[in-house]
Image (tube, rainbow, N blue to C red):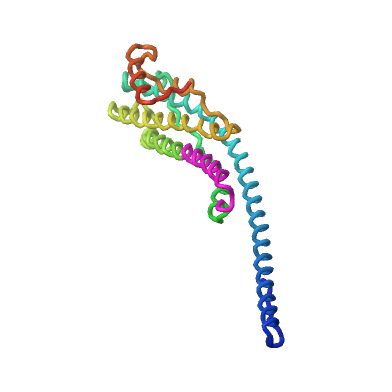
Amino acid sequence: MLDVHPAHHAATTWRDFLIHIATIVIGLVIAVGLEQTVEYFHHRHEIAHTREALRLEREENYKLMEKFVRAYKVESAILENNKLVLAALQQHPGTPAEKLPGVLVWRMTRNQFLTSAWHTAQSEGVLALMPKDEVLSDEKVYDALRDITNENEEEWLALNDTWSFQFIDPDPSHLTAAQIADLTTTLQKQMMKHYLRGNFMGYPHHLDPSFDPGPPNAELLKFHQTNFDIQSEAVSKTTARLKTAGWMPQP
């Protein structure tokens, strides 16, 4: 801050008084201008630093998404495998492990994306200095990544519930009919969360095409089986009702 010193002698005329006041005002204006200039360049530096940090974080999340999408396909196969094994146990309880159509597999990838640069920008107030459209665009991406992570965590919890029986007896052929029914229910919950996560994984690509587009619809539809013919008259009637209500089917 620039110091403004008073004149060494008292003003004796109106002219001296006005010059004295003008000197003080000019000094204050210069001081405020210098302070604002320093603050302006400081804010520009903060914004540039934040943009670079967000860019680098986004690029790392591109790579993570590719990794998670590759793992998703394997995880879908694991769930289908487990469903097949449990179905065999439901139909024939007590079937020896060696005669089952496979073995139960309990594995999945934790979908955790990088968010530290975004949270730092929030906590330090830098986002308030950036254009609103730019901040909103970034916010939508991080919200989409958070949705994937949250669904993945729920799927992870369902997985833990599903395979907890192995702490007592790792041989599924020893399970009772009631235990197999409970196990099938928790597996269905895990499969539902898995399907929802697959849908969420496609949204970041709509916001930023550099993200992996996620599991293809054909893969999701194959995983989420339907018990009706989509070409049937009944389906056509339902579709017509939904269209009347304003629903627009995806191409």
Position in image of residue 138 (x %, y %): 55, 42
Q: Which residue is at a point 44% across and 37% down the rendered structure image?
A: 151
- Seen from the viewer's position, the closer of residues 116 and 130 is 130
Position in image of residue 246 (x %, y %): 38, 26
- Seen from the viewer's position, the closer of residues 138 and 119 is 138
**Residue reaching furthest front?**
14
- Seen from the viewer's position, the closer of residues 66 and 83 is 66
Q: Count of labels shown?
A: 0
Task: Answer left or right for 122 relative to 155.
Answer: right
Query: Is 62 part of what is drawn in magenta?
Result: no
The image quarter containing residue 8 is: bottom right
Position in image of residue 44 (x %, y %): 66, 54
Q: Is residue 87 above or below residue 4?
A: above
Q: Is residue 3 above or below residue 217?
A: below
Q: Is residue 235 above or below residue 210?
A: above
Task: Answer left or right for 165 relative to 133.
Answer: left
The image quarter containing residue 21 is: bottom right
Look at the magenta stretch and give its main secondary structure: helix
Residue 66 in sight from this viewpoint: no
- Seen from the viewer's position, the closer of residues 152 and 25 is 25
Position in image of residue 45 (x %, y %): 67, 54
Query: Is 128 part of what is drawn in magenta?
Result: yes
Q: Which residue is at a point 28% across and 29% down the rendered structure image?
A: 178
Where, quadrant-wise, is the N terminus in this rendering?
bottom right
Q: Which residue is at a point 39% across and 25% down the rendered structure image?
A: 247
Q: Which residue is at a point 54% across and 52% down the rendered structure image?
A: 122
**Residue reaching furthest left?**
178
Range covered by the magenta-colored residues: 127-149
Residue 177 in sight from this viewpoint: yes
Q: Is residue 87 above or below residue 109?
A: above
